[in-house]
Amino acid sequence: MKIGYIRVSTREQNNDLQIVALKTIGCELFFKDTATGANAKRSQLQKCFKSLNKGDTLAVYKLDRLGRSLGDIISLLDDLKARGIAFQSVTEAIDTTTPTGRAMWQMLGIMAELERSLIVERTKAGREAAKIRGVVMGRKPKLSKQQIEHARKLLAGQEHISNVAKSLNVSIRTLYRAIEKAPVISN
């Protein structure tokens, strides 16, 4: 059975074009969502995936009807492939029941991998640039240098660690870490 999935982003958008295109390629059953592609909880898409059986074909008008990111689309299509379900996209001329369609599918996988690599590269470059500008990465310390020195003095005066931690509003473990990491300020 060939099943069509249709998505429009807003109620004002019309899904007639998608319906006609999917009927033309032989879809017998349709699932329709009105939701943004970023919205992962598209109830009709979930129902559509549950209704698909081995040997069925899921068809869409365009790839972006399944999701916004190539990674999400690849993940959905990998799930279909593992379940023995074919995929067809009208506008991109992808049909995984044909050799050309399978080749296009593999190209999509390569493009998704490239996209992930580029994102990692850009993120790494952004972090390096931020470090050069003096941006400190990670969480802000819970305790200032003065608070750590005050805690050291209290502990040296035989104050119990749990009382010191409580007075600084941190856990004992956080206090220990802060004391270990912070250099001792000598007067």
Image: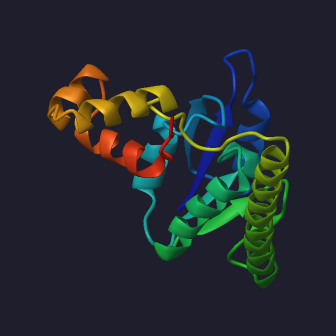
Locate residue 52, reporting x and y percent: 45, 59
**Residue projecting furthest to the top:** 12
Residue 104 visible? The answer is yes
Residue 61 at least partly seen: no
The residue depicted at 81 percent of the width and 74 percent of the height is: 107
Q: Who's the residue at 74% across and 39% down the image?
A: 135
Measuring from the top left, give residue 170's x and y in whole percent.
30, 30
Q: Which residue occupies 65% across, 36% down?
A: 7
Q: Nearer the viewer, residue 8 or 169?
A: 169
Q: Quadrant of residue 133?
A: top right
Relative height, residue 108 to residue 155 (above, below): below
- Left or right: where 104 falls relative to 85: right
Going by the picture, which residue comes out furthest to the front?
A: 187
- Nearest the viewer among 16 and 176 is 176
Q: Position of residue 95 (x, y in %)?
A: 74, 69
Q: Quadrant of residue 77?
A: bottom right
12 and 39: which is toward the camera = 39
Coordinates of residue 158 in the picture (x, y in percent)? 16, 35
Q: How many marks?
A: 0
